Amino acid sequence: MNTKLNWLMAHTAPGSLVLQPWLTRHGISYSLSQKYAASGWLTRLAPGVYVRPAAGTTPSPTWADAMHALDEQLGLPVHLAGLSSLAQQGLSHYLSLGQETVWVGVSGKQSLPKWFRELPEQQWRYCRNSKLSELTADDFTLLTVKGRDLPASKPELAAYEVVDAIGQHISFEHAAELFQGLVNLSPRKVQDLLERSNAVQTNRVFLFLAHYCQHAWAKRLNEFSITLGSGKRQVVANGRYDERYQITVPATMAAKQRAEHG
């Protein structure tokens, strides 16, 4: 076995995804990758995308394998986001039925490879946080998912991503259910996050849900430092108007707010 093949075997695990740009950086050309594929050391899944066979079989890569490859081999700024991050941290009762939907955080207008977007039997939900200024290391944690270490939103950012996706990837009611379990968010981190956000509607709904769930950390937020804009916002159709945050919310939630606050 030659030196480059030895290196490949030492730096990949059976069943792992292997991407050509990463191989090229380590001295394994496209033509050499093709030879390895012809010899059974690699199995081609798509142009420039391989999987290392395991015990004579070719396992299907998981979504965690795909995200790990983007992060570790391509260095793309992607992370496990929103509902998926909360679920992996035990902060959601969400259960996947059938095809698994995974929330992926991407940076601005960052485009992802075609093979990733078209991974068989996989649905992605993208969170771009376009109205949130630059994210910092303090916004993320590292989670081990399906045997892969993945960067993921800390609960504060994940909660923000959930709220920002209301009406697109998740309902207002489902977001409210998730917020019920977010009793231990850091008021310092929430404050810092919302101060970096220019998404008026997202900020208003986040604060509404925090107070609706009567979380202690909500009382420690300085709303005067958060961009809340002016004018009314229709968040849900046929909803009831919440005067404090000037947004429409589901009628049942508005009724509860009025009953509790007199």
Image (cartoon, rainbow, N blue to C red):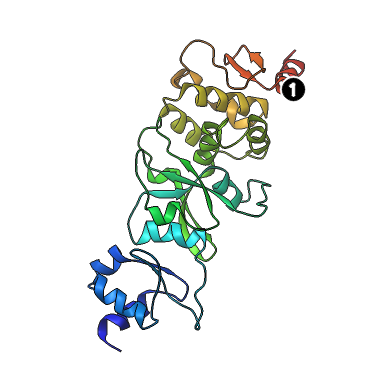
The residue tagged with tag 1: helix, strand or loop?
helix
Q: In this image, 30 relative to 111: left or right? A: left
The vertical placement of 146 against 13, above or below, is above
Q: Amino acid at mark 1?
A: Thr
The vertical placement of 119 against 6, above or below, is above
Q: Nearer the viewer, residue 155 or 128?
A: 128
Q: Which residue is mark 1?
A: 252
Q: Nearer the viewer, residue 221 or 98?
A: 98
**From this viewpoint, which residue is outermost toward the right?**
259
Q: Give the number of callouts.
A: 1
The vertical placement of 120 against 83, above or below, is below
Q: Position of residue 177 (x, y in %)?
A: 68, 36
Q: In this image, 27 relative to 142: left or right? A: left
Q: Quadrant of residue 245?
A: top right
Q: Quadrant of residue 24?
A: bottom left
Residue 63 visible in the current orientation: yes
* Residue found 57% across the figure and 17% down from its top: 234
Residue 28 visible in the current orientation: no
Q: Position of residue 236 (x, y in %)?
A: 62, 22
Q: Position of residue 106 (x, y in %)?
A: 41, 44
Q: In this image, 29 relative to 44: left or right? A: left
* Residue found 46% across the figure and 29% down from its top: 194
